[in-house]
Amino acid sequence: MDYFKQDLASLHADLVAKKISAKELTQATFENIKATDSKIDAFLHLNEDQALAQADALDQAGITDDQPLAGIPLALKDNLVTKDQPTTAASKILENFTPVYDATVVSKLAAAKMVPVGKTNLDEFAMGGSTENSAFKTTKNAWDQTKVPGGSSGGSAAAVAAGMVPVALGTDTGGSIRQPASFNGIVGMKPTYGRVSRWGLIAFGSSFDAIGPMTRSVKDNAMMLSAIAGHDDHDLTSSDKAVPNFAADLTAATSVKGMRIGLPKEFLADGINDDVKQAILAAADTYRKLGATVDEVSLPHNKYGVAAYYIIASSEASSNLQRFDGIRYGYRAKDVKNLEDVYVKSRSEGFGAEVKRRIMLGTFSLSAGFYDAYFLKAAKVRTVILNDFKAILKDHDFIMGPVAPTPAFNIGAEIADPLTMYMNDILTIPVNLAGLPGLSLPAGFSNGLPVGMQLIGRPFDESTLYKAGYAFEQNTEFHTKVPALGGQN
C-alpha cells in the first residue's frame, strides 16, 4: 500500500467499492512497517493479530459511505492508554504495564471503526524534543536517518512521513506535535486546550497537554480532529463546544482572500535559521498573492515563554509523576531493605535522566520559600503572553511563523545540552502557554530537510487554520515531496 499516493478519502472510496478489503489494507500496512521500520525505529509495539481480526470483522459487517474512517489503519503514541495492549510512555518504569481501559480518543476512533496497528516511540513521558530520551530506542528522521525526527511525538511523525501508516495520533505539551511534524514534512494539529479529551493520556503537564492528529495532508488532519474532538464526562477540562465537520469546509472554493494575518517580528529574529526565515517570508508572499494581508506584529514577551513553561510544566510533572512509585505500576527495584528503599530505588532506576531533571526542577519551584519567586511569577508571565496573543488576534484572523528555529539536527548533537534543546521549542511553547490551536504544515526545504510553517488561531477556531493551511497546500507543492528512505531526497 502506497500511502504517499492515497489520502483518507481515496482509501475510504476503495474500501466502500471493495477494491480492497480492510484486512488487505491492514496486512499491507504491516508489510509497510516491516519493510521500513528497521531504518526508522518508529514503533515500540505492533498489534498485528488484534488489528487483523478487527479488520476481518469490519469486512464481514461491510463498510458504508457514512463511515469515512472505517477500516483505516492508524498508529498511536505510546502515552495513550490502550486496553490489553502495552503502554509504556517510553519509560522503563512502565515497561510491563498493560492498561485495563482505553483513552477516550482511542474509544472514539474505535467507534469510527479505525484499526490501530501499533504504538509509537516518544521521549520518555513526552519530555524532550528529539525522541532520543526514550528508554528503548532512538527514532530516526524519515528524510535523513542521521537526523532526529523531533519530539516528543517523533515516532508518530516518522511513521506517517515514511509512509508506514496514513495517520497517527500525537500529543503536544510544548510543541510535541508541531515540531516533529515540521522536521518530517507532514501536517500536525495541536488543538485548543480542552477541544480533545485528555482522559487516558499519561499526564505530563496537565494544563498544557493536548492530543492531536498527524497526517500527510491538511484535509486528512481535519477529518481526524472531527473524529476525536468533543466533550467527555471523564475530563472536566474538555469543552462542550460543538465540533464542526472541519473537512467539509475544505473545497476548491476555500480561500484566504480578505483574511488578515499577523507575522510576529520575534518569529524571524536572530537565531532563526536563514533557510527557515526565507521559507516563511515566501509563504507570506503566497498568502498575499492569494488575497490576504500580512502585517508585521509583535509578541514582546515571547522570549520569556521557555523559562515560564519549564517552571510550570515541570511543577505539574513533578506532581503527576509521583504516582509512579514502584507500588502501583510497572517497575519495582529488587534487593530493597524497606518501604523507603522501594520508592527511592524504583524511581531512581525507573526514570531516565531528563525525567529526573524535570521532577527536581518542578519540586524545587513548588517548594516552600521558592513558590512565589518561581511558580507564581511564571504563572503571571503566562497571563502576559496570553494577552499578547489576544491583542493580535483581536484584529487578525491568525498568526503565522516558523515552527522551529532550525530544520532537523543531527542525532546526538544536542542531547547533552538540555538548555539548547529547550530553546528549540521557543516558537511553539507560547501557544501551549496560551492554550491556543496551532497547525504545522510543510512550507519549504533546507538542504533536503523539510521546513514547517505554524499557523496560530483564536481559541476553538481550528476551522480558520485548516482553511488557511488548505489554501496554502493547494497552491504549493511542498506536501507532495516524499522521502527516499535510506538515501537523501
Image (cartoon, rainbow, N blue to C red):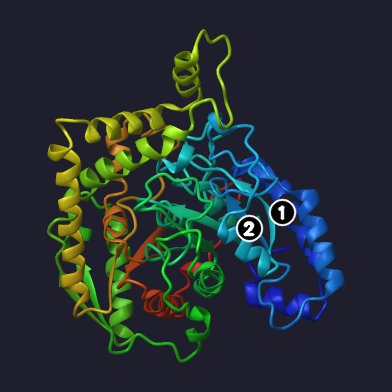
Q: Residue furthest right?
A: 60
Give the residue drawn at x 54%, y 26%: 327
Give the residue drawn at x 52%, y 80%: 247
Question: Height in image: 361 above or below 212?
Answer: above
Element at label 2: loop
Q: Label 1: how many residues lie within 10 Å, few (<14), some (14-19) or many (20+)? A: some
Structural distance between the alpha carbons of marks 2 and 1: 7 Å
Where is mark 2, residue-wise? 163
Percent across and percent down for residue 366 are 24, 35
Question: Height in image: 61 above or below 53?
Answer: below
Q: Amino acid at mark 2?
A: Gly
Percent across and percent down for residue 276 are 31, 58
Percent across and percent down for residue 231 are 48, 69
Where is mark 1, residue-wise? 32
Percent across and percent down for residue 410 are 42, 39
Question: Height in image: 38 above or below 334?
Answer: below
Q: Quadrant of the N terminus?
A: bottom right
Give the residue drawn at x 34%, y 29%: 357
Q: Label 2: how many residues lie within 10 Å, few (<14), some (14-19) or many (20+)? A: many
- Side (left or right) of 337 relative to 259: right
Give the residue drawn at x 87%, y 70%: 60
Task: Say whether marks 2 and 1 touch (CB < 8 Å).
Answer: yes
Q: Amino acid at mark 1?
A: Asn
Residue 447: in sight, yes or no? Answer: no
Residue 476: in sight, yes or no? Answer: yes
Element at label 1: helix
